[in-house]
Structure formats: C-alpha cells, structure tokens
C-alpha cells in the first residue's frame, strides 16, 4: 500500500540526476527521496535503444522495491527511449524529463527557434523534437548531438580551452537562430559557461532540473499524495559503483552531508543485492 | 576436453580488442578465434576495480562456454586489474596485454625512459609500472592517464584540432624524456598521428597487438597446442550491444567480411542468452 509518506524515486545513469534531486529538495522540502545512480553501467547515451530500455526497467524495479510513490527518470537518454516501457512495468506514476523541459523551453521562445543538445541516443530518438512540436508545430527546432560533453564534464574540464573548442565545434551552427537552448543531458549544466560563451548571453539555457521538479509537485498535489508530515525528510542514495566518489560529488553539489549512500548490485534479471 | 582445434578466446570492453585479433590473424592464420566485446557496458576504464573484476570474470566465463583453449584479455584495463581473478576462474591458460607489451617496450629503450599512457583505472593500478620495473628497475618510467582519448577515438576524431589540443595537454610533459611510449589502451593506436605529432618522430609507439599475439604463439607452441588443420579458420564475434555497428567497424578494421557476428546478453550471475 503506497501512502503519502512513501518516498519519491529518482534514477539516472550516474550522477547527473542530482540536478533534479537538488530542485526536488528545494521545491518539495518535506518529501522523502530514494535515488539510484547506475554508475557501474554509465554512460547510457552511447548504448542502443534495446539496452537502454533493459537497464531503465531494472532501475525502475529497484526503486519500486523501495516503495516509491512516483518514479522520476532523471536521465534524458532513458526518458527519451524508455518512458513507455518503464510506465508499462510501473505500478506508480512515472515522470520523465522530456515533456517538462520542452514545456519550459517553449515558454521562453520570442521570435527565433529552440535548440536541443544531448547525447547521440537522445538526439537520434527525436524525443525532444516530438515533444516540442506537440506544443507548437510552428517553432523551428535545431538539434545537435554533443557526445564529448559528458566526458569533458566528468573530467571536470568546465572552463578549459579544450571544452571551448569542442563547444565551438558543436554550437556554431546555432548562431542567431535560437532564443532558447535545451540542455538535454543532466551533465550539460556543468558546462554552462562554455555553452553560453558560444551561444551568447541572449540565449536562455533551460535544463531539466527545475521543470521536472515542478511537474512532480503538480502530480503529487493533484493526486493528493504530498507528504504532510513535518519530520525531517529521509534521503537514500544507491549507486551500482563508486559510492565514495558519488558521496563526495553529491555532497558538494547538493551542499549538505548525506547520511545514507550505499552500493547495490543490479542483476540483469531484475534481482538486487 | 580441449583439443588443438579449439578456438583462441579474446575479450575486450568493446571494439578495441580487434587490434589484438588483427595480429592473431596475421601471426596465427590457422587458428579459430572467438571474440567477445562487452559493448553494453563499455567503457571499463572509468569503473572501479571491483566492478571491472566482476565484468572480466563474466566475460571469461562466456569464452570458456565456447570451449576456448586459451583466454586473451585484450583490454588493458581488465588486464591491469583482473588478471589474477580471471586466472583463478579459468580452466585454460590466460594471457593479458600488460607483460608482453612491457617486454616489447623495454626492448626499444635506448638512453631515456619509457612512457605509459592509459585509462584512469589502468594508470592508477600501476600494472605497467610494476611489469616494467620487473624487467629493468633502472629505466625511468613516466605515466599519464588520458581519459579523453577513448571518447575522441570513438567519435572518429583521429585528425582533429580538438584531439591535437588534448594530446598536447596530456603529452607535453614527456618531451625529451622517453624513447618509447606504451599505448596502454587498445583505442589509442587510432590516435597514433596526434600522439606522434606531440612526441616527435624519435619516440617509438608500442601497442599491445603484436606483442600479445606473439606471446599467444609462444604459449600455444610450447604447449603443443597449435592448430595443425589446414582448413579455413572459423571466426566468431559476439558483442553485448550494437552488433551492426560492431560489424561495420570490424570489417573495415580487419579488412575482411565477417561471417559470424551475434549479440548475446551477459547476465551478472554469469548466465548468457
């Protein structure tokens, strides 16, 4: 039996989903959260649809075993390729990052188009394009896969000549053509300076964090599932590899000590140890 | 019962191990080969020792199920971190790339030192350093992790200003200090031009392919396990994701049509489907 006190479940291919967690903590400060980061199989963005769907269902099953009341797919690649299959395996509502982020981006369009950058799998799926066209079929959309951005972000090369050169390579074609750029991968906000440096200050950068957290708020609120308890919320973080490294990065990024970080093993048949 | 006609087994985290396969085909043209590339979990170089060891044992088990007479760990990261555990699970001889490559490199030293470049996990393991010191404890060794080289190679950016800039960043410190550079990751031979461009023409670049294939020849020959049959050898390639993409790259790289490329699913409990 799922009650209001049950946690929100969030999964990602690794650490990127923390951008969504941070916004959930801000916007829904009473909610308990269970996070799973699949650091033993990161990245998802260079895998096939078939493998991404398999992994996403396993990740969702793990969250369900923790009694979550909603599943948030914080990973753009998994949201783009596995929403339907996660929904069909889930006994609770499932939210991805694509629709909320597309909505937020479309709201910022003035006279030009919307840009989308993401992993190869996300861009090839056209998921953002479809979501954007569903909102407004007239607005021009320009997409670009940026496969080197994830390794650059993971290397911490946020402000580095190499990152600037790579950003120029990927982003020059957007020049003068867009009002808004969707950062369609949870790693990309870390490269905000380099991206903004090429696009110019008049292009709004939209990431999944805030929009997705707001849509979780709407869902829980409309379903009368908000946690009303005033006790301190419980945050549990699970990863499939590198719990110490995850802990360090997460504490820095979330600006708080984490009391519960644990390594779990995800078996391909759905078992967890 | 393992006979001389049984295949040589080779595994790698992805496509990189083909550099070893190409040399095996050259040096041991009568041998049957079974290859496994773990493309659903690539890369290994950014995973923990614990996870790399788990994956390597599963990969080896798969090869053993195909009746291989020897296991070749073509992946530098897995060789550096999982030789002992693969050996202890294997019923046939196991060869990694570290010792043969270190041997070949030490043979080319003139008056200066040996450089080693590889993934973060390979360099942190000090496996090459240990192997080189075992051969000659006097020769200076200089190591450097080059985590961006794998994504650059996978993006096909072999001759690109970004690759040159990254190579300069990683390799400038080797200037004037080494006679030989070990390309301690199977992807790096693809970036040979950029690496050579920074190091200069008087530094020998040594990769795992030829040295490892020669050590397989020695092992089979000394154990009287060379295949004496004159029939056309059988080559079987298995991958855990992207069989079409693998097939394309492999055919181009090996310069021949592949008759057998199949996707398999590796279960974490060791089962294969």
Image (cartoon, coloured by chain):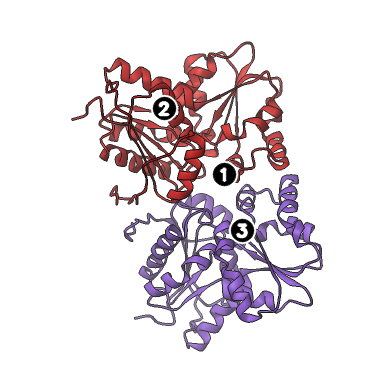
Chain colours: A red, B purple
A120, A228: nearer the viewer: A228
Q: Is residue B233 above or below residue B37?
A: below
- Left or right of residue B145: residue A6: left
Residue B10 x/y as whole percent: 49, 68
Q: Which residue is mark 3?
A: B187
Q: Is residue B11 above or below residue B43?
A: below
Residue B38 x/y as whole percent: 46, 57
Q: Which residue is mark 1?
A: A154
Mark linked to residue A111: none
Residue A218 x/y as whole percent: 36, 17
State yes or no: discs 2 and 3 in contact (Cβ < 8 Å). Answer: no
B119, A160: nearer the viewer: A160
Which marked residue is nearer to the observer: mark 2 or mark 1? 2
> Which element carries disc 1, helix, strand or loop?
helix
Give the residue displayed 47% in from the left and 21% down from the top: A211
Give a yes or no on whether discs 2 and 1 share a subunit: yes
Q: Which residue is mark 2?
A: A25
Residue A260 x/y as whole percent: 36, 42
């Amino acid at each position: 039996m799922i009650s209001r006190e049950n946690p929100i479940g969030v999964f990602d291919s690794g650490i990127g989903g923390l951008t969504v967690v941070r916004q959930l903590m801000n916007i829904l400060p009473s909610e308990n959260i269970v996070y799973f980061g699949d650091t033993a199989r990161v990245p998802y963005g260079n895998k096939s649809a078939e493998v991404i769907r398999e992994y996403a269902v396993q990740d969702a099953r793990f969250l369900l075993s923790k009694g979550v009341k909603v599943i948030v797919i914080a990973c753009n690649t998994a949201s783009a390729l596995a929403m339907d299959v996660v929904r069909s395996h889930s006994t609770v509502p499932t939210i991805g990052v694509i629709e909320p982020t597309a909505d937020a981006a479309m709201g910022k369009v003035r006279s030009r188009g919307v840009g989308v950058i993401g992993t190869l799998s996300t861009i090839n799926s056209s998921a953002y394009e479809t979501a954007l066209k569903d909102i407004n079929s007239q607005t021009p959309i320009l997409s670009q896969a940026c496969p080197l951005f994830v390794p650059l972000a993971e290397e911490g090369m946020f402000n580095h000549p190499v990152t600037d050169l790579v950003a120029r390579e990927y982003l020059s074609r957007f020049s003068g053509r867009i009002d808004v750029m969707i950062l369609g991968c949870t790693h990309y906000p870390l490269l905000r300076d380099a991206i903004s440096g090429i696009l110019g200050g008049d292009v709004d950068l939209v990431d999944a964090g805030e929009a997705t957290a707001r849509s979780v708020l709407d869902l829980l609120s409309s379903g009368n599932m908000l946690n009303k308890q005033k006790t301190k919320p419980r945050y549990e973080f699970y990863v499939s590899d590198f719990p110490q490294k995850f802990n360090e990065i997460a504490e820095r990024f979330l600006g708080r000590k984490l009391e519960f970080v644990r390594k779990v093993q995800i078996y391909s048949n759905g078992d967890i140890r």
